[in-house]
Image (cartoon, rainbow, N blue to C red):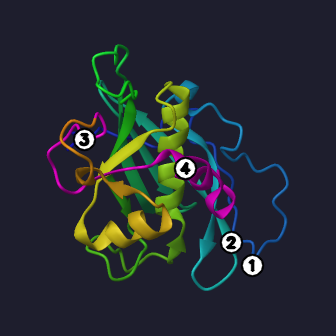
Amino acid sequence: MINNLTFNPYVKNNFNIQNVKSKKQNPSFCGIQTLTHTNIGMCADGYIGKIRVRLAEGGEAFLNVFKGKGCDCEEYKIMDDFSNLIGEAQIKIKKIVNYDTFEHKTNPSHVFVDNLRNYSTPGTPYHNRKLVYYKDIGTRLLQIAQRRSDEAECFGNIKLIYKNESKPFYKNVIHMREENTFSGNSPLRMWGNPNLMFLPPEWKEPLSRLQGGL
């Protein structure tokens, strides 16, 4: 598990967000700064842009993304315009430069995703009942991890260790696979945890486009 970071979303000159309501309430979104063309790795700590998500009751909303960086990982928080924490995830870049020693010459570099949470989802252990239910939070956090994997030359590879209640989402929506299905000599089986999942090559582009992408 990646250690928690000290995170302050109100860093001076970084907390620069717009008070935007859901599309259902406000259909005009001209000038919204999303992460579509953002180099996330080059962003300083603090507010980096907005993501578009769906409301469970119908319609859309734009939420704010904040970045925090520690010595060995990055933390991303999704918040509404009232500073409520909607979701978060930590990522660690595992870049392996010399992979010629691996039997199948498959580059094992990847981004490891930890502590991915959507606090607005009912029926989950981390649910905050005070929040509106936002869909696509987990998807957007994984897309951020995938973007960072591409930027760090990890070829869009992402891995995580799932909890039992989240396995259907990772398996059926994101189409990740359990790594323990590979033989012991495979370079794709680097960890012993049976809950370790990875994103297979054929599902990298679909993830980047899922629900419209970043």
Q: Amino acid at mark 1?
A: Lys
Element type where label 1 sits in the image: loop
Q: Which residue is mark 1?
A: 24
How crowded pointer 1 is (Cα within 10 Å; few <14, some 14-19, many 20+) is rated as: few
Q: Which residue is mark 3?
A: 189
Q: Amino acid at mark 4?
A: Glu
Residue 194 x/y as whole percent:
18, 55
User: Do the residues bearing badges 2 and 1 touch, measured as CB atoms within 8 Å?
Assistant: yes
Q: Amino acid at mark 3?
A: Arg
Residue 85 sits in quarter: bottom left
Mark 1 or 4, nearer chain start? 1
Residue 103 sits in quarter: top left
Mark 3 or 4, nearer chain start? 3
Which residue: 34% across, 13% down?
Answer: 98
> What is the quadrant of the N terminus in the image?
top left
Q: Which residue is mark 2?
A: 60
Mark 1 or 3, nearer chain start? 1
Which mark's residue is nearer the viewer, 1 or 4? 4
Which residue: 44% across, 50% down?
Answer: 77
Q: Which residue is mark 4?
A: 202
